[in-house]
Amino acid sequence: MRFDEYAAYDGLGLAELVRKGEVTAAELVEAAIDGIERFNPRLNAVVHKAYDEARAAANGPLSGPFAGVPFLIKDLGLEVAGWPRTSGSRFAPETADARDSELVRRYRAAGVVSVGKTNTPEYGIPGVTNSDRLGPCANPWNPDHISGGSSGGAASATAAGIVPLAHASDGLGSIRIPAACCGLVGLKVTRDRTPNGPDDYDRAIGFSVDHVVSRTVRDSAAMLDATDGPEPDSPYAPPPKARRYLEEVATPPGRLRIGFSSRTASGRPIAPEVQAAFEGVVKLLEELGHELVPHDIDIDWRRLYRAQGRVSAANFSAGMKRRIELMGREPGPDELGPLARRAYEAGKQISGQEALWGWQELRAFNRKILASLAPFNVYLQPVMGTPPPRIDALDPGAMELDAFDKAQARAFPFTPPFNFTGQPSMSLPLAWSASGLPLGMMFTGRYADEVTLFRLAAQLEQARPWAGRRPAMVSAQHA
C-alpha cells in the first residue's frame, strides 16, 4: 500500500480494509514506517522506533475496532513493556519499562499496532514540544512553527499522516493545544474517564487525562469506546456512558444553548486573525440552528492561577522526590531543563499549608466555573490566542523564563480551567490562518457529557470538513 493511499484513510477506515482483506496489517505497518522515514527527519515527532516489534505484532492475531491500525504512544506517563520512557528529561532511568500500563493494554485490545513513541517536552510542562533531551518537534503545516505541547509529537505525526490517530495526554491543554496547532480533533476527556493506573501519583491533583488526537471525530469516539471505564480500584470513577460514543456521532445534537467568549483571563485581546475565525464559527453555529449566548466567566482569574501555581509546583516537586528516590540521587545541574528546575525548586519552598490553601481555592473556583456554565449545553472559546508561533519565538531553552511565560500566556490563554473542573473539552480544526496554519476552536461540555460534544463535533465536521486537507510538505510527497 502506497503511503498516499494509506494516509487518505482514518483509523476505522484502515481497519475496515483489513477486515475485508483488501490490505494486511503488515502492509499498513510498512506504510507507517515509510511515513516515519520520510517525514520524521524534518518533524522530529517520533523519538523511539519499534519497527521489529510492530512487524511481529502485525503478523499475529489481531482483533478490535482498530485491528491492524498503526499507532504511536506519547513518551510520557504510560508504561510500554520493553520500551524506554524518558519523559523528555535527561533525569530518567535508562532501563525499559517492565509492563504495560492498563491504558496500553486497552489500546492493544482495540487492535492497534504500536510502531513507536512520540516527542514530548520535559515532564509535559509547557505548551510546546521542545526539550534538551528530545529536541524540538515541528508542525507539518509549516515546520518553522510549533506543533504545540505537550502532545506535540503525537499531533505532528498524525497531521503528517504517519498514523491516523495517536495517544496523547492533557494536564493544562496538552491535547487541545497540539490538536489546534496541527489541524486535528483533540478531546480532553472527563477526569478519570480513561484509566490512570495504580501508580498515578503524578495525577494526584486530577488535572491530567489520557486520550488521543485524530483526524476524524469518529476515530476519537471509537477509541474512547475501547478505552473508557474505570479500573476496579479507581477512586473517582465518572458516570458511565449510556451507549457507545460511536453511536452518538451519528446522532444529531438538536438545538443547543451555547455560551461563547473570547475574553482572556488577562483582558488582553487575542490576535485579530483568531478573533475573526472565532466569530465565523459563532455564525456557523447560528446557521446550524443553535442558540448562541455571549458569556464571560466572571471570576478572579489572578487568584485562581496563583492557587493553581502553588498546587502544581508542590505536586511536581513531590513527584520529583519520588523520582530522586528511584534514581538514588538528586538531578545533576544539566539533567533538568529550566522549566523543570524552576518548578522543582519552587515546589520545595511551598509549605503544606500553602499547597492545601491552593487546593481549597481551586475547589471553590471550580464550583464558581461550573455554576457560571450551568445554563449552557456547551461553552465555546478559541483554543489559542494566536496562530501557532514560530519555534524560535517560544523556546524554553533559549529564552529568559519571564519572557517565555509571557509568550505562553499570549498563545495559550484558554485551556487550563477545564482541567481544574474535570469537564470534557474538545478542540476542532474549524479555521485556518492566511498563512495556512490551523486555528482550533474549543468546545467544553458539562461534566461527564462527552456525548453532546461528539454529536456537535460530528455536525460541524459535516458542515465544514477538514479531514481531506493535507499539509503542503505531505502533499508534495504524494505528488
Image (cartoon, helix red, strand yellow):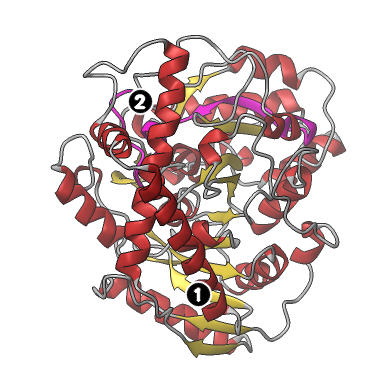
Q: Where does the N terminus fall, quadrant-wise? A: top right
Q: Mark 1 = which residue?
A: 368
Place of residue 315 in the rendered image (x, y in percent of width and height, measured from the top left) = 43, 40
One can see residue 436 in this view: no
342 on left or right of 51: left
Q: Crowding at label 2, few (<14), some or many (≥20) Cα neighbours within 10 Å?
A: many
Q: Nearer the viewer, residue 371 or 388?
A: 371
Residue 246 placement: quadrant: bottom right
Verify whether residue 352 appears in magenta.
no
- Mark toward the viewer: 1 or 2: 1
Residue 414 placement: quadrant: bottom left
Residue 277 placement: quadrant: bottom left
**Which stretch is magenta?**
107-134
Q: Mark 2 = which residue?
A: 134
Vertical placement of residue 329 versus 267, above or below: above
Q: Considering only order in the chain, which callout, 2 or 1, is on the residue closer to the N terminus?
A: 2
Q: Nearer the viewer, residue 55 or 427?
A: 427
Verify whether residue 118 appears in magenta.
yes
Q: Crowding at label 1, few (<14), some or many (≥20) Cα neighbours within 10 Å?
A: some
Q: Amino acid at mark 2?
A: Leu
| Distance of label 1 from label 2 (alpha carbons) | 40 Å
194 on left or right of 88: right
- Contact check, label 1 and label 2, Cβ < 8 Å: no
Place of residue 138 in the rendered image (x, y in percent of width and height, measured from the top left) = 34, 39
